[in-house]
Image (spheres, rainbow, N blue to C red):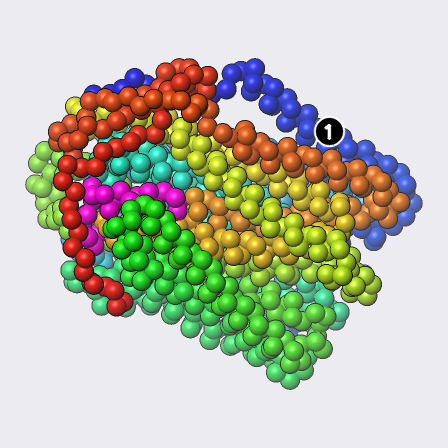
Amino acid sequence: MSAPRPAPSTPTLARVRRRRGLRAGLLGAVGLTLAGCSASGSAQGAGSSAEGAHGGEVNLVLPDLSSVTVMGGASGRLLLILGLGVCVLGLGFGLLAYLDLRRMPVHPSMREVSELIYSTCKAYLVQQGRFLLVLWGFIASIILLYYGVLVGLAWGKVAVVIAFSLIGMAGSYSVAWFGIRVNTFANSRTAFAALGGRPLPVHRIPMRSGMSIGMVLISLELFAMLVILLFLPPDIAGACFIGFAIGESLGAAALRIAGGIFTKIADIGSDLMKIAFKIKEDDARNPGVIADCTGDNAGDSVGPSADGFETYGVTGVALVTFILLGVGDPAVQASLLVWLFVVRAVMVVASAVSYLVNDWFTSARWARAPRLDFERPLSNLVWLTSVVSILATYATTYVVLRDLGTTGSWWRLATIISLGTVAGALIPELVKAFTSTRSKHVREVVKSSRQGGASLNILSGLVAGNFAAFWLGIAIIGLMGGAYLISLTGLDGLMVAPAVFAFGLVAFGFLSLGPVTIAVDSYGPVTDNAQSVYELSVIEEIDGIDGELEREYGVTAQWDTAKQMLEENDGAGNTFKATAKPVLIGTAVVGATTMIFSIIMALTDGLTTGLENLSMLHPPFLLGLVTGGAVIFWFTGASIQAVTTGAYRAVEFIKGTIRLDGVTRASAEDSRRVVEICTQYAQKGMLTMFLGLFFATLAFAFVEPYFFIGYLISIAVFGLYQANFMANAGGAWDNAKKIVEVDLHAKGTSLHDATIVGDTVGDPYKDTSSVALNPVIKFTTLFGLLAVELAVSLEAQGRHTLVLWLAAVFFLAMCFFVHRSFYGMRIQTSLEDDDTTVAPPSSNDPGDAEVPRATQDDAVATGSGPGATSPQPRLPAEDRELIETRTGDGR
């Protein structure tokens, strides 16, 4: 039985045209303003050596890398060419894993579901690709206007910057494509492997898919940067690196923001149906489940893949920039550059070797085991890779840098990187203390939910997030402090501001686990999707399925064991998705210090003038420190608002279309419509927030350069703690629900309902707002390089009044999009809507209580009339009483 289908709640054509016209007019006005000031600036600067005066990092020239010799005569250039070979092998490793996954056995019913998920993911990514090209065109026009017209760089250099910005964005986009294809192979294969009743294959398949993505991602990024170092003229390498990094950040920011909004709209819309209709997890009749699976890939695969690609690239560019700006001796510059990229190549090998060793050990240890703690092999892999990476770092650094500078410089630099490597293993352990199903914090969330329901569930989750932010912050401070102390022991003879370089190396060390960090993060979406694929395939209801599995695949199906293993593995995936988030945000914040240093070097003429402005005694600097926090909190609210409105729209649609009688699964048409709703609100929210951040960067860069420095420091610091708080609170709520479902077997109870509510609160916390802050910080810092140079150039031409007017224009544009991020994303309905009770679900469904169900007419769908509000479900007739035990409390 179904309720009437609501009409889509879309604005009228006239409103759409007005909005597009206003947006186009605003962007056009900004472009004309920049073009005008650029043209006039160019006229004034004719005849001067503009390239030498402006352009910052774009004019950096690489030293002769072949001058570096190691191991008795091997040149640095040869080592980097060998690094290219490692990248090719890494790409081959990922491709072989991909082909192996595709050949694995899978039942057609499961393959059909995974291919439907992939088709919806393709549609989403194609749409995002078009959207990215529009955003890239806008960024490219700013690069063209500034460097080509105002600064007066040679048009060839300008073309290189623009081309490599496109390459960087394409890199982020391509690894996202590869990630969803691998994951949608792995999810159905994992679900099928669970039927055998052995846990080892259920672990190995998502682990293999994760390593495939990790190896391809890191190898592709490193390959692109090595090509710049080895095969492009040294005088345009700076342009290539800056363009590449801006493109990566643009792609990652857009895909992270949009993916985070999409996945949580779908997840919340699907989860709330469990409360409204008392249906099971991933019920095939729920049209929101396919969108939820698509969202798992859009938010937990596409976003992290693009984010990881950008993180590794931007961190490398930041260190290259520091070496060329902060190290005076070209020979030392060359040695450090060769060392950095050789270490990165060695880390790829270390990760691959560690994975193979861990896989062999895990297979030998649990080959025939009936049970497996799915978190244990993942933790073993992280720690094994850390140890191998640290040993490889010391060995490589000794070989390449043993003759560098003062005695012992090689071990100092290796130790600083190793501090970051330790962080890559230590931070996941800290995160598990707040998000694992064994965590006392998570169990506290469950206990508080027993008597306090959703209210105390949410409060306990907030406690976990706050404590996590404290301990993770202290850990990062301790590691950075250690790096600072080591930098005081002689590195000042090699460079200026050695502490800043040390901080950049800590960020570099965070990422030394390379493919493994990406692999354990990618493990989660596969395990989540595998559980959904199992339910959506309705394989248990196929006539003669037991005989078919025996005959065709030699599998004796163990249905109950399979479902239990998939649930337990999903809990492990949730935990390790949570562990990767603080590593990436920590890298963004620590690495941002190196990029900010580049701006400071330009503003102070190499730390020779204006240093007194980097003080609280300089009011603009202090005001900038305060301003950054405001932007972080706005962004957090805007991203959650986009999820809230989109989820409301998805819930509204699902309630009007779900059929619980006479069908076994939702129609493909209804499922695709939910995907369209998620995509619509993801793109709308992402565009508004992106433009708000874009104009904020321009406005604050034009206000005053040192105000902007304070602003960049502020968004990094506020972003670090806000992201860690939200990611860990969300992880705690997520796994509290998993404990109720897996350990307590309490689905369908009021306790389960309370944890579902907590989980839906945590969804945008952990997978939308927190994760998007990482690329936002880096994009703001990178684009800020261009923005502040533009402002300083105009000031140098005596156009102070114009700069202030432009700052005001950009600020008003920012305020417009900040305003729209709420008022343009509000739920279009009235407060006077009434509930309408419809017939209950089928008697075959859990619970037989009459469930209030919202209905909508066309007027409400367009925001012009009354309709229905969210459901007010009655509790089940007999809510099982859970017996309080102390099981697991001591863990």
- The location of residue 506, given as percent across then percent down, is 55, 67
Give the overall secondary structure of the magenta segment. helix
Span highlighted in magenta in the image: 742-763
Occupied quadrant, residue 282: top left
Q: Left or right: where does residue 25 sit relative to residue 513?
A: right
- The location of residue 211, given as percent across then percent down, is 38, 56
- The location of residue 381, given as percent across then percent down, is 36, 65
Task: Work out whether residue 873 can be spotted.
Answer: yes
The quarter of the rendered structure image containing the N terminus is top left
The residue closer to the viewer here, 488 or 96, is 488
The residue closer to the viewer here, 55 or 181, is 55
Give the residue drawn at x 58%, y 61%.
590
Give the residue drawn at x 40%, y 56%.
463
- The location of residue 317, given as percent across then percent down, is 62, 57
The quarter of the rendered structure image containing the C terminus is bottom left
**Up/down of 890 relative to 311, above or below:** below
Indicate yes or no whether the magenta region holds residue 149.
no
Give the residue drawn at x 68%, y 25%.
25
Mark 1 residue element:
helix
Residue assigned mark 1: 29
Give the residue drawn at x 11%, y 38%.
545
